[in-house]
Amino acid sequence: MTTHPAGSIEQHPDIVEMRARYEAAAETPVAQGVTGVIALTGLYLAASPWIVGFSGLSNLTINNLIMGVALALLAAGFASAYGRTHTLTWTAPIIGIWTIIAPWVVAGDMSTTSTIWNNVVTGAVAVVFGAAAMGVAAMRKNV
């Protein structure tokens, strides 16, 4: 059995090349725009109960706050270290899907016109741009 000194896998040529490819893809203007929209979507989602006016619905307010902060933090990770966080891009569309269905499934029926419109539109943006973030690595094949 071959053993490797601690941390040697990080220096493997294939891993170094893969990270370089992902970092190069993440530096494109399209990728930066996608990441920016995801971050803004997360910040809006977190603040939306107070912007739209349903902060009295505490369960949905807490849900949107937590999901929005999580989405914004994910976007910060994608922007700062895409080579190490690209495997988490699938979570952005999942957060978007959860955001869409949350008014109906969060404890107690929270579906009002304002919560439905807010969460469906915000969730759809998160799904579309999350899927785009998943495709960033495929945008650029060569470094």
Image (tube, rainbow, N blue to C red):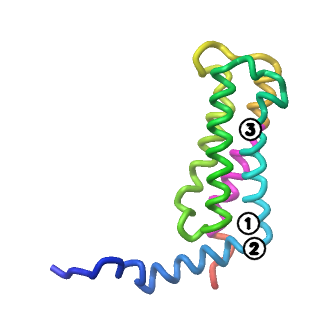
Q: Earlier in the sequence, mark 1 or mark 3?
A: 1
Which of the two marks, 3 or 2, is nearer to us in this view?
A: 3
What predominant SS class does the magenta segment belong to? Answer: helix
For numbered disc 3, what is the local secondary structure? helix
Q: Are marks 2 and 1 in contact (CB under 8 Å)?
A: yes
Q: Distance from label 2 to label 1 (Cα)?
A: 5 Å
| Looking at the image, residue 83 lies above or below residue 119 | below
Disc 1 marks which residue? 31
Does 133 sit left or right of 29 as displayed?
left
Sequence-wise, which precedes: disc 3 or disc 2? 2
Q: Residues within 10 Å of mark 3 (few under 14, many from 20)?
A: many
Residue 54 location (% of width, % of height):
78, 21
| SS for callout 2 | loop
Magenta stretch in the rendered image: 122-137
Residue 28 numbered tag: 2
- Where does the image place residue 8, in percent across and percent down from the top left? 35, 82
Residue 88 percent location from the top left of the image:
54, 56
When asked about the image quadrant of residue 56, the answer is top right
Q: Which mark is residue 45?
A: 3
In the picture, measured across the screen, residue 47 lies left or right of residue 69, that is: right
Amino acid at the residue labelled 2: Thr
Callout 2: few (<14), some (14-19), or many (20+) C-alpha neighbours within 10 Å? few
Label 1 element class: helix
